[in-house]
Image: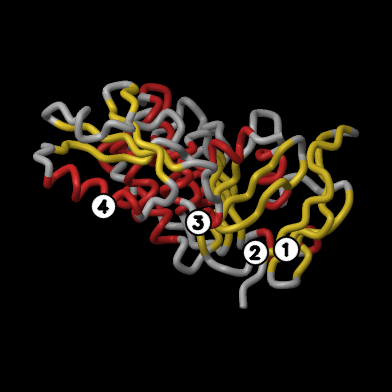
Amino acid sequence: MQKLELMNVSSGYGKTEVIHEINLKITEPSIYVVLGPNGAGKTTLFRTIGGILSPFSGQVTLDNSNLFESKEVRKKLTYLSHLNAIPEEMTVFNALKYYADIEGGDVEHVLDLLNLRNLKDAKFNVLSQGQKKRVSIGKIFLRERDVYLLDEPTSNVDPKISKEIRDILIKLSKDKFVFYSSHNLYEAKEIGTYLILIKNGKLRFFDKIDNVKPKQYRVGIRSLNDISGMLPESKVENNYHVVTINNPKEVGQIIKDLVQKGAELTEVRELDNPLQELFEED
């Protein structure tokens, strides 16, 4: 069984410790969403797992092999920075080939995977921010790894490309460890199976996202016709009729009752993200 483990890992820069005594045991191929406020230590955690930063103390092991004692083990991991880190004057093809020559891999595969073929001869400095992000992401798909560490991979990317990237990662996570940091809590809830919450450099939460329950369930309902009289207990917020319920299973009965009363519903959505509540807790 594949296993990535952090045992009492503290790490940082120079003499400044950023993350403190992190303990994690990862055994299930999946997407692990890493959340935390700016400066919480997410990037430091990624760089330490990826072998870029040596821990001040503790150990990082992959399949029981110490990450910092074996180059072969480190080759099984790849890290995507939130920075693009592509030479500005290089063409897309040459930039990807540059990394492929160092680490191995298939440039043609990446061009097709991320729909970059029509940009292969364009210089990196003339690309849009979204195009630059796609090229940067391409680096990690040049060859197969066991662990993928992606620091805000969908920032500055339009919704269409963002979805394409998420779809690739979801497919990848069926037999790989994928770590994914994001400031978009709704995206995190959509894509992730597990949540790793970092605050002030410490691990504050590690569990399945499905186990994070909101303090309250609020449902927003929109309709083509006025449903105020059909939902006397509701409040109107941002053009939604908002109902607070005890259990999400109640939503089905509410919708059924409204339709029977003649409501022409156009949207029903959950308004509260339990990750937001967890994120804001002290």
Say which element carries label 2: strand
Q: How is the rendered protein coloured?
A: secondary structure
Quadrant holding the N terminus? bottom right
Quarter of the view holding residue 157: top left
* Residue 136 visible, this orientation: no
Q: Mark 3 or mark 2, which is nearer to you? A: 3
Quadrant in which the C terminus is drawn = top right
Residue, disc 1: 5
Q: Nearer the viewer, residue 250 or 107?
A: 250
Circle 4 residues within 10 Å: few <14, some 14–19, many ≥20: few
Q: Secondary structure at mark 4?
A: helix
Q: Mark 4 sits on what residue?
A: 253
Identify whether 57 is placed above or below 156: below
Q: Earlier in the sequence, mark 3 or mark 1?
A: 1
In primary-sequence order, the first of circles 2 and 4 is: 2
In percent of the image, x 45 and y 37: which residue is there?
A: 272
**Which of pointers 4 and 3 lies earlier in the amino acid sequence?**
3
The answer to which of marks 4 and 1 sits earlier in the sequence is 1
User: Disc 2 versus disc 4: distance between alpha carbons?
Assistant: 39 Å
| Element class at badge 3 | helix
Q: Nearer the viewer, mark 4 or mark 3?
A: 4
Labels 3, 1: front one: 3
Residue behind mark 3: 210
Residue 125 higher or lower than 22, as above or below? above
